[in-house]
Image (cartoon, coloured by chain):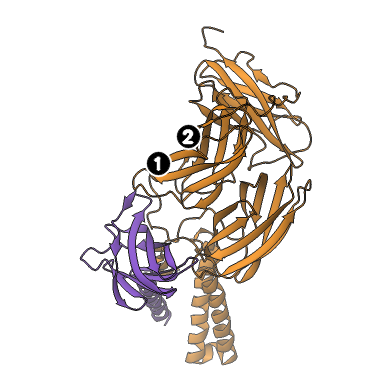
Amino acid sequence: MRLLLLPVLVLLALWPVPAGAHVVAPGADLRIAQTIAGAELTITVRGVSRTPSPAVVEIEAFNPVPDLPVELAMRSAESGRVSHARVRLAAGRPGPYRASVQVFQAGPHELEVRTPAERSVLPVRVLVPATSPWELLIHGGFYVAGILVVAGLLTGGGSRPVSAVAVRTGGVVGVVALTVAVMSPQLPAPVPDGSAPTARDGAVGGRPYVLATVRAQPARPAAGTEFTLLIDLVDGSTGRPVDDLVLHHEALAHLVVTSADGGYFRHLHPVRLAPGRLAVRLAADRPGRYLASAELERTDSGGQLVSGTFEVTGEPAGPPPARPVAPQPVTVPARPVAGRPTTVEIPTRGRLRPWLGMPGHLIVRDRAGGFLGHVHATPGRASGLSFTFSFPAPGGYLAWAQYAHDSTIETVPFTVTVGTESGT
Amino acid sequence: MTRRLLAAACLAAAAMAVVVGCLARPGTVTAHGAGARYAVTLTIDDNGTADVVVDRGGAQEVVVSATMPQMGHSTPEERARRLAPGRFRAAEAAGGLFPMGGVWEVSVRVRGGAGEEVIPLTVLVGS
């Protein structure tokens, strides 16, 4: 029996190591948040198990939903073949809206999302499950063993040398197949078709840092008018555009834009115009200096935060919007201490649902704008959300808690004053 | 008899392993890429020489460069020699296009009647 295990072990030692798992697993859905043409969308591309086959693209819009035609184009980056689909968002109806695009082959694709005013080109890698060589070996082995044993027995069993050889050979093949079957859960899984090439030694050490240039277009937009915020991402080691962003909490980037005084807050998900270039359309209601910070993640790397500023000119576009009356958050302890965990309890309303893969998000900024934290809610009370965070230094902080209920994203602004151990 | 069978099984397994190992060894690498104007096939041989066949679109000039995102390496742009209509070759000097093995992103910049387009391709290059 030990001798029988030898070929299996030899195969195990010499079989090529498959590529590491990609961010998109075979058959798994891909969810991308996009802020496009004034709408906050979550686009889901359903996985496919074979090609060619149709892939369902689902678009969910959050309130307020505009009347908006959306054209989809799925293009293979290897063959250039394109499949088109179209949906029309109805004003006030969150969806979901479904369309179907044809996927002709596995591998890298670009999903273009086009509205009359804006477009986004999203990289999507289609993976299709590959047949496991071990399964072939197991099924083929049992099949051959069965034929040999039955044929050997029918032609004389042990009484004729040829028949005896057939029976024994069948037995050996059966034992090998059985051994592989028993070991198969520990054997390397097959690499899905369409996977990106991966080095044998895998990713070690992460990728270089990202440098970002944030600029408004026009350069000094007027309050109350719509403008484009461009974010150009450059690799710190090569100077080339960074185009290997992975989906970080269901978005290529999470862009937080705040006015210097914190009275203006937006959490947006820029579209991708080209390699290394992200953009979002927005309008600011008051003049002054604005801070923009994008949270993103490169392939095989951790999350990064890149920041920039821009100026808005002109006169305030009307009085500041009245803050909605909402139950105020409760902090535990009541007087937060720098460097010590503080829990913030946020009362919520409506039927909570995950947004960006989490039950809730808390954005924390210091008064000067040099510090930005992004905290995720932990499962807590049924009627609210709970965030725990250690404020790094004493002082005043601006905070915005966000969560989704039904098809609406709620933003709860509040402030936190953090003291020191000795001062409290 | 049983010993002979077992020996034969071992030999067969060893032969299969050798075949599998040879097939898995990185050698010539081929990748396809398509943009809106051009489609290309890139072939990297054992020496790192890059052959570019422009499958779609009339190309007059092809320039290649490579980036290794994991290590932060990039190579200078190199204008490919035109071998025949639609066929180009770059990095013919010793050492080829890639200074080290690993996953490289090759940018193939194609110029022709349809304008200019950069087509990115990802290849795994043996060390």
Q: Is residue A339 above or below residue A209?
A: above
Q: Nearer the viewer, residue A371 or A227?
A: A227
In the visual, does A104 lie left or right of B77?
right
Q: How many marks?
A: 2
Q: Quadrant of the C terminus of chain B?
A: bottom left
In the visual, does A350 lie left or right of A224?
right
Query: What is the x, y in percent for residue A187?
Result: 49, 61
Q: Is residue A325 above or below residue A183?
A: above
Q: Is residue A380 above or below residue A184?
A: above
Of the two numbered discs 1 and 2 in the rendering, the one whose residue sits closer to the viewer: 2
Colour purple belongs to chain:
B
Colour orange belongs to chain:
A
Q: Earlier in the sequence, mark 1 or mark 2?
A: 1
Helix, strand, or loop for circle 1? loop
Helix, strand, or loop for circle 2? strand
Query: What is the x, y in percent for residue A417?
Result: 59, 15
At 53% from the left edge and 91% from the top edge, which residue is drawn? A159
Q: Quadrant of residue A376?
A: top right
Q: Quadrant of the N terminus of chain B?
A: bottom left
Query: What is the x, y in percent for residue A183?
Result: 51, 62
Q: Which residue is mark 2?
A: A307
Q: Nearer the viewer, residue A322 or A182?
A: A322
Q: Amino acid at mark 2?
A: Ser
Residue A160: assigned label: none
Determine the chain carrying the residue at label 1: A
At 68% from the left edge and 64% from the top edge, which residue is drawn? A100
At 49% from the left edge and 18% from the top edge, which residue is drawn? A393
Determine the chain carrying the residue at label 2: A
Q: Amino acid at mark 1?
A: Tyr
Crowd tier of the residue under label 2, counting other residues whose Cα lies within 10 Å: few below 14, some 14–19, many 20 or above? many
Q: Which residue is mark 1?
A: A209
In the visual, does A308 lie left or right of B77?
right
